[in-house]
Amino acid sequence: MTFVVLVGLWALLAAGCGAGTGATSVAGEECGPVEVVASTSILGDVVGSVVGEHGVVEVLMPRGADPHSFQISARQAAAMRRADLVVVNGLGLEEGMGGAVETAASDGVRVVEAASFVEPLPFSLDGGGDETGHGSLDPHFWTDPARMAQVVTGLAEALAAADPACAQRWREAAASYREEILALDEEIEVILETIPADRRKLVTNHHSLGYFADRYGFTVLGAIVPGGSTLAEPSPADLAGLVAILEREGIRAIFADTTRPADLAEALAAELGEQVSVVELFTGSLGDPGSGAETYPAMQRTNARRIAAALGDG
């Protein structure tokens, strides 16, 4: 955003704060626009829904990027150092970003990990920590809207700390968006009602649906890529074991992330016959316009509908 645009936005916000918007002034500070940098497209959409027109949100990862392997540019690293607040996922998700986040924090930039606002889950036994940077805790908490509602509340406090003059505004905006996310959670429960209990079994191309399974009563039987990262490689023994699980459990679908090639999933499905399909889900990134996953709520609805269609009675 140019300097001229920022100045114009500041003027509008200052006028709005004096017109009964509910924003308060702290120690004579003006309530003005906040600059936020978010690591993933999912976090960028959530932060943007809270900030609205009262700030600027720059998202580091483009839509469709794999958050595990993404590396930031020098320009993006400079944007992080200028930001009022940097929001990252945490729990090792942004493993390709190297020490850029740590460097920004050491330079005095306010950095917050969204994972710090939720109770993390461990990976399943076959998807434990790996050599690519993950520990034993699963970073994919956004697949559970109830946990994302907690993140929204935490982000309000992070914004209030970064921009105290607008603290009331951030808390009110976050409270409103939190209600939307909780309503989304209830909507997804209804969508998934068509899936019988004995079909609530998930096989994925990497371990990304642990929180979804925990929230909605599914079991994750396995994943093609071992561990929690997409950067690992399955061994022939891994694949043979997964095929045995698929055959034993009568699995009808393998769920693949849109940010990674589905070649291995397609090969496994072909080996098992026409009764097994490969279903793409938006688990690592939002989708492009027209995809049905343009926003975080839209992404969650689309994923739920695809899972229901693949596993449900209808």
Image (cartoon, helix red, strand yellow):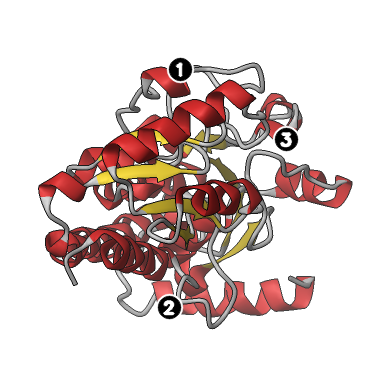
Amino acid type at image mark 2: Gly
- Rendering coords of residue 27 (x, y %): 45, 47
Q: How many marks?
A: 3
**Closer to the observer: label 1 or label 2?**
1
The residue that appears at 63% across and 63% down in the rendered structure is 63
Real-space CA distance between mark 3 and mark 2, rounded to the nearest whole angstrom: 41 Å
Of residue 224 and residue 81, the one placed in the foreground of this image is: 224
Compared to 62, does 20 lie above or below? below
- Rendering coords of residue 202 (x, y %): 33, 44
Of residue 157 and residue 264, the one placed in the foreground of this image is: 264
**SS assignment at label 1:** loop
Real-space CA distance between mark 1 and mark 2, rounded to the nearest whole angstrom: 47 Å
- Rendering coords of residue 205 (x, y %): 52, 43
- How many other residues sit within 10 Å of disc 2, few (<14), some (14-19) or many (≥20)? some
Q: Which residue is identified by label 2?
A: 16
Picture quadrant where residue 122 is located: top left
Real-space CA distance between mark 1 and mark 3, rounded to the nearest whole angstrom: 18 Å
Amino acid type at image mark 1: Ser
Q: Is residue 268 left or right of residue 124?
A: right
The residue that appears at 53% across and 36% down in the rendered structure is 224
**Mark 3 vs mark 2: which is more N-terminal?**
2
The mark found on residue 136 in the picture is 1
